[in-house]
Image (cartoon, helix red, strand yellow):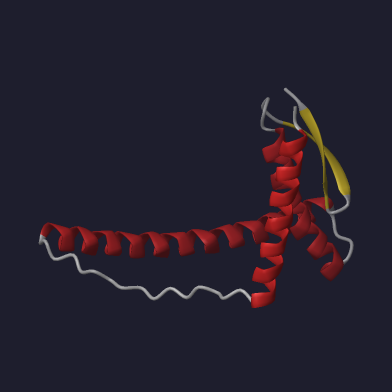
């Protein structure tokens, strides 16, 4: 079982993990370190266990918020899929027209690109002419 050294809140820890999971552990530790470092700058020096507890709680709170957003998004997706399915089974799928705006390139850019293309073609012709 590999051991990985991680740093959280300026403190180093040796942590064992499953083979192949080292990168996941390092990523999780980096997330925890961000929270712990933020706490250290706001609160100052605190016991290791309290720092880790508070950083873990902050991450858990952020995760719970993201889970709520995912749940709402999944609900909206289910509604749209149900509407689409209903519309398609009733044979009344409406055509939706979307206006697409295409950015216009300045004339100078187009001229420069044309010149570059011409030079490239000339070089290619020259190289082909020199080939045996």
Q: Residue furthest top?
A: 1
Q: Residue at x 72, y 33 (%)?
A: 22
Q: Quadrant of the C terminus?
A: top right
Q: Which residue is at a point 31% across and 73% down the rendered structure image?
A: 97
Q: Is residue 91 left or right of residue 32?
A: left
Camera-nearest residue between 69 and 61: 69
* Residue at (66, 63) in percent of width and height: 114
Q: Extreme left residue here? A: 90
Q: Front-most of 79 and 85?
A: 85
Q: Which x, y percent locates residue 80?
A: 29, 64
Relative side of 76 to 85, left or right: right
Location of residue 63 (image quadrant): bottom right
Name the spot of residue 121 as percent of width and height, x first: 69, 50
Q: Identify the image quadrant of the N terminus.
A: top right
Pick whichever, 103 or 96, lies toward us: 103
In the picture, measured across the screen, residue 115 lies left or right of residue 48, that is left
Placement of 82 over or under 10, stated as above or below: below
Question: How many numbered marks does the figure carry?
Answer: 0
> In front here: 57 or 68?
68
Relative to 9, residue 98 above or below: below
- Could you tell me which residue is drawn at 12 percent across and 57 percent down? 89
The quadrant in which residue 60 appears is bottom right
Q: Residue 64 at x, y = what percent?
A: 54, 60
Reply above or below: 84 against 105.
above
């Amino acid at each position: 079982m590999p051991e990985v050294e991680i740093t959280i809140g300026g403190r180093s820890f040796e942590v064992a993990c499953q083979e192949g999971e080292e990168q996941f552990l390092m990523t999780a530790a980096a997330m925890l370190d961000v929270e712990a470092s933020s706490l250290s700058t706001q609160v100052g020096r605190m016991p290791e266990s309290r720092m880790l507890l508070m950083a873990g709680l902050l991450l858990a709170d952020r995760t719970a918020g993201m889970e709520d957003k995912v749940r709402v998004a999944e609900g909206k997706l289910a509604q749209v899929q149900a509407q689409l399915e209903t519309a398609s089974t009733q044979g009344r799928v409406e055509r939706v027209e979307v206006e697409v705006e295409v950015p216009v390139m300045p004339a100078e850019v187009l001229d420069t690109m044309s010149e570059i293309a011409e030079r490239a073609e000339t070089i290619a012709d020259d190289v082909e002419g020199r080939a045996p």
